[in-house]
Amino acid sequence: MPGKAHAVAGSGVPQHGAIAFVGELASVAAVPWKNEGGQTRELCVEPPEADFASFIWRASVADVGSDADFSTFEGIDRTIVLLEGGGFTLHSEGRQVHDLAHCFAPYDFPGEQSIQVRMHGAPTLDFNLMVRREVAEGRVVMLDERNSRCLPSHSALLYVARGAACLSDEDGLQQALRAGQFARLQPGQRARMPDLLCAPGAVVLLVCIIPKQKEGQHM
């Protein structure tokens, strides 16, 4: 897998308020894995331009075309979500630990765990989140038309996996999003998170990042 996180400079359109920028998966350059088993498109990394030794969190979409070994990452918590394709099983120390066969169902595992992927058949597209454990907690939440709502304050990234959705801010400005598009979210001093409206049949993945309280620090 690639050894450095690449910023998506130029692929996102700057916005206002809590929507920092909007990008599209098709506009993000694919980086082949070193083992040639797949390729990754990075959606967002924080801080921007951070490498794998310094990022706080990183979100990406990967194409997996053959059996492969995942790279290990000390101190990193990982979440993987099947977007489309045949899926695969995850193996560690000679045993199966998970079957990634169902779309839009997040699976969490520690980055230190040695993982081998065994394909079910067809190539697979999956969403990935990595979070530095000592700095923050992260999770991926699947949303659809039943969950249309004001997004929580710790929302960081929204990816439309299927169908269409719309973000609406407190000033009434609307941002339409279709499948494959994503929005980087970050509240300003005044701006609150926008409302999310999912069209019937749409599926949206919401990345939430919660900073951890440092020792001796009081909320």
Image (cartoon, rainbow, N blue to C red):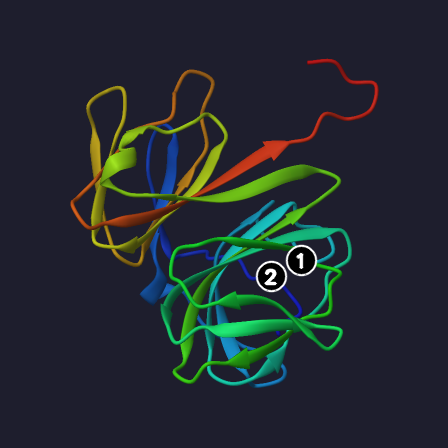
* Picture disc at residue 51: 1
Q: Residue at x 78, y 18 (%)?
A: 217
**Where in the figure is residue 213, as x and y percent of width and height?**
72, 25
Q: Is residue 46 left or right of residue 198?
A: right
- The secondary structure type at the circle numbered 1 is loop
218 or 7: nearer the viewer: 218
- The secondary structure type at the circle numbered 2 is loop
Asked whether the viewer can see residue 27, the reply is: yes
Precedes in sequence: disc 2 or disc 1: 2
At label 1, which amino acid type do we have?
Answer: Asp
Residue that label 2 marks? 5
Q: Residue at x 56, y 86 (%)?
A: 36
Is the C-beta separation of discs 2 and 1 under 8 Å? Answer: yes
**Where in the figure is residue 1, as x and y percent of width and height?**
62, 74
* Picture disc at residue 114: none
At label 2, which amino acid type do we have?
Answer: Ala
Quarter the C terminus occupies: top right
